[in-house]
Image (cartoon, grey):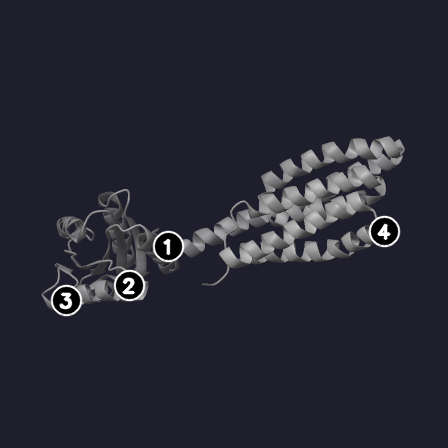
Amino acid sequence: MKRSSKQYILMWISFGSATAILPFAIYRLSQHDWLVGIIDLVMVTGMYMLGFYVYISRKTSYGGVILSVLALTGVCMVVYLKGPTLVYWAYPALVGMYFVVTPKMALLLFSIGVTILIPIVAINEDLTITLTILSTLIVNNLFAFFFALGMQRKQDQLVQLVRHDQLTGAGSRRALDEKLQEVIEIVNRVPQHLSLIVIDVDHFKLVNDNFGHAVGDQVLINLVTCIKDNIRATDSLYRLGGEEFVVLASGGEVQCAHHVAEKLRALVSKNVLLDGQPITISLGVAEYIKDETADSWLNRADEALYKAKKSGRNIACYAD
């Protein structure tokens, strides 16, 4: 399975930070600076462990928060023990948080870090140096905050574009593939009934040829609206491509999914998706078989759809 960008970022920041701190830990321990050396070593060990955990498990939940808290705690302790000359470690630690946690969480952790660090600096330095350190920390983190906020919004927009079909608003093919992998992993651990309903608009090419692509697009939009309004809250709809759609029906045996398919078929045949032109759909239904791949499951549903088309269209058929 391909790794996400979040996994890569978390792994490399963990490994990179640990590797950068390791020489200081070794040097301090060799100089019998035991307390600070042990703090550095704990940070290095924790970061390496977190990096390997993400590498092996591929899980990133709370990983960014753990890394940020670990780094921030280590920096605050070292500055407290060794003095404000080491406050410069706070700059990469505080800015680096924006790469592994949300901007709001990073801003909260930054506020906590500054609240701890500035009094330590103020005790040991004059007012000018303290204000300089405080100002530069704030400016750096404001830049990082607004940059991270902008990147998060762009990422959310990209996710929206990737996961949803732009014409109809149904889930995209990529979203379907991800969802199938997710539910298959779950159902192989905790058995439950899942079915796919593949839907195809009958003679859709004639609609485009006779009325134009703009009208054909509107038919697909109307169809998706009809389907979304009449499937269960636990079901989800995706566009497979062209005029073909897929409903993932959760819960209930295949007969329940077939009931949903028959309901949709009847509704579409009665509804006016195109003025003066009857529109019908054919459907294929396939229940998931344990240890089956997503492609095999989808292919069986597609074969049932092909059977429906061969049987005269405007029909819902089971997979073998």
Type of amino acid at the residue the image marks with label 3: Lys
Residue that label 1 marks = 182
Asked if labels 3 and 4 touch by Cβ distance under 8 angstroms, the answer is no
Residue closest to the far left: 311
Type of amino acid at the residue the image marks with label 2: Glu
Residue 217 seen by the camera: yes
Picture residue at 25% right of the left edge, 55% below the top? 219
Neighbour tally class for label 4: few under 14, some 14-19, many 20 plus, Cα within 10 Å: few
Q: How far across and down, in percent of the image, does residue 141 sit?
A: 70, 42
Which circle, 3 or 2, is nearer the viewer?
2
Q: Between marks 4 and 1, how big is the CA–CA gap?
A: 52 Å
Residue that label 2 marks = 292
182 above or below 88?
below
Name the quadrant containing residue 301. bottom left
Q: How far across and down, in percent of the image, does residue 235 sit?
A: 27, 47
Residue that label 4 marks = 31
Neighbour tally class for label 3: few under 14, some 14-19, many 20 plus, Cα within 10 Å: many
Type of amino acid at the residue the image marks with label 1: Glu
